[in-house]
Image (cartoon, rainbow, N blue to C red):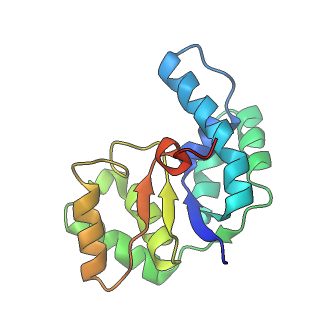
Amino acid sequence: MAKEKVYIETSVVSYYASRPSRDLVIAARQETTRELWPVLVNRFDRYISMLVLMEIGKGDPTAVDERKEAILDIPVLNITHETESLAEAIVREGLIPEQFGEDSLHIALATVNGMDYLVTWNFRHLNNALTKTHIMHFIEKQGYFPPVLCSPDELLGDSV
């Protein structure tokens, strides 16, 4: 049986590779992400994108190196005309604000490349109960099969 495909959005890489936090919510997300990582390795075909590489390349050089180390063996999806067009359509439809166009590009990259899941800690625009159903319906209207937008907690389920 083929493994399902998961697109790992930047926030997940950042939580995985970041220094332990004293903030309880952040610390819980870091722990969940660290529990998720071996599950991703064993149960899924994992993917990131050029956008993820660009985003994790920003900030403190030590943190950048740790994030890059975490994703060394993960295949990278390219940004194409098709992914850019779908991302622009998502923004035009008002589903993601224009100033957060990168979020629509993550969705487009996962969609166009046939991902089963897009895993993210971004609850503002990606894994938001008020918008994700509208995003999924819009993607279907464009002729694509949308990935499931979910948090690491949701993807883990009872796996650990």
Q: Decide: is 16 above or below 146.
A: above
Q: Which residue is drawn at 71% across and 43% down?
A: 67
- Which quadrant of the figure contains the C terminus? top right
- How far from the left and from the top, in percent, is residue 77? 62, 71
The answer to whether 65 appears left or right of 115 in the picture is right
The answer to whether 70 appears left or right of 125 in the picture is right
Residue 96 shows up from this direction: no
- How far from the left and from the top, in percent, is residue 86? 36, 76
The one nearer the camera, 70 or 154, is 154
The answer to whether 159 appears left or right of 97 in the picture is right
The answer to whether 65 appears left or right of 45 in the picture is right
In this view, which residue lies farthest toward the bottom? 143
- How far from the left and from the top, in percent, is residue 131? 24, 54
Answer with the quarter of the image where residue 95 lies.
bottom left
Q: Which residue is drawn at 51% across and 46% down?
A: 157
Residue 126 shows up from this direction: yes
- Which quadrant of the figure contains the N terminus? bottom right
The one nearer the camera, 49 or 152, is 152
Q: Decide: is 85 above or below 60.
A: below
Q: Decide: is 51 above or below 84.
A: above
Q: Which residue is drawn at 54% across and 44% down?
A: 11
- How far from the left and from the top, in percent, is residue 106? 47, 62
In this view, which residue lies farthest toward the top? 22
Q: How many labels does the image show?
A: 0
